[in-house]
Amino acid sequence: MKKNLLMIFAIITLTNLSAQSHQGSGVNGTTLNGATGLIVVPDAQIGWDRAKLGIDLGYNLVLSRNNAMKHLPRYSFNLFHFLELSGLMQIDREHEAIDSSVIGTKLQFFRGDNTALALGANMEIPVSSRYNGINLKAFFSATYSGDLFSMPTSTTVTFGWQILESDTLSSQLIYGMGFAMAIFPEVFHNYLIWITDFSNFSYALYNSAVDADYRGSFNTGIRFNPIKKGRFNLLIDILGTDLFETTRGFSIGISSGFAIVPMESRAPVNTITNGQDSL
């Protein structure tokens, strides 16, 4: 199953690399751990790439078939067009306690008309006494934007290295890929985005509701973009998580943000726009 999924994503990625370029600014949503990206896979975008200072606040409820219920409040600060600081608290409903907190950063070091490249890292710190060791992750992300079947599409490939438990020095290569596609833009005017990703890592390691250990996870859903005009942004996600396994689940989330420092006329990386005066 994992090989078939990798082949499908590789075909989509290669097709997108040869697609016609698309002009527009991005619908830059956040992953479940707060970094700008898809569902669990971070991309090379910065949430507010046309403001010197922007902030996003979000929340997801994740339910899975292994009876896990997680509350995921998260945040993201975007600075100087190229730097992002993000964070998450993972709250376990069953134990009514914080499992872990995640803090991360991302540096966008290249920005072209249709391509962005970034380096990032995050650290997960267990809060619950049930877990030990700090989880570290470093990654490289490449995002390309084009038109696939006449629909604006942004494709991301991410890979890196993860230290699973700092006290044991166990580690693994991590990889992920995914895309965001505007569904029937002539009808929905780019307000409705299909997001999908596959990876062998999750938004968090300790007691995560999206279990990617040993086999990877496939996640997909819809991202609504009702407001992205001027200095404000609102996104609503309805997601299916780890869909090809018995631990499959459902998540609904919302994130809202605003540019604190006034916007500048800097041209954005070309991804998906809703036709408004967006960032």
Image: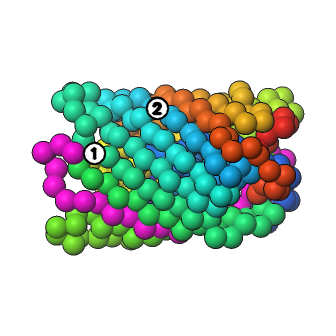
Mark identifier at residue 136: none
Q: Name which residue type carries label 2.
A: Tyr
Answer with left or right where residue 98 lies relative to residue 82.
Answer: left
First-in-chain label (2 vs 1): 2
In-front residue for pair 139/197: 139
Residue labelled with disc 1: 100
Neighbourhood count class around disc 2 (C-alpha, 10 Å): few under 14, some 14–19, many 20 upward: many
State the CA–CA distance, disc 2 to disc 1: 15 Å
Provide the residue span drawn in magenta. 127-151
Is most of the magenta stretch helix, strand or loop?
A: strand
Mark 1 secondary-structure assignment: strand
Q: Is residue 129 magenta?
A: yes
Mark 2 secondary-structure assignment: strand
Q: Residue at x 81, y 56 (%)?
A: 266
- Please identify the residue farthest to the left as the structure is shown: 129
Q: Quadrant of the N terminus?
A: bottom left
Q: Residue at x 35, y 66 (%)?
A: 162
Q: Residue at x 48, y 59 (%)?
A: 105
Answer with left or right where residue 213 lies relative to residue 52.
Answer: left
Residue 262 image-quadrant placement: top right
Residue 116 image point, x, y percent: 69, 64
Answer with left or right where residue 130 lies relative to residue 51.
Answer: left
Residue 205 image point, x, y percent: 30, 52
Residue 65 image point, x, y percent: 31, 31
Residue 46 image point, x, y percent: 63, 54
Q: Residue at x 65, y 36 (%)?
A: 258
Neighbourhood count class around disc 1 (C-alpha, 10 Å): few under 14, some 14–19, many 20 upward: many
Mark identifier at residue 59: 2
Identify whether 50 is placed above or below 116: above
Q: Name which residue type carries label 1.
A: Ser
Q: Quadrant of the C terminus?
A: top right
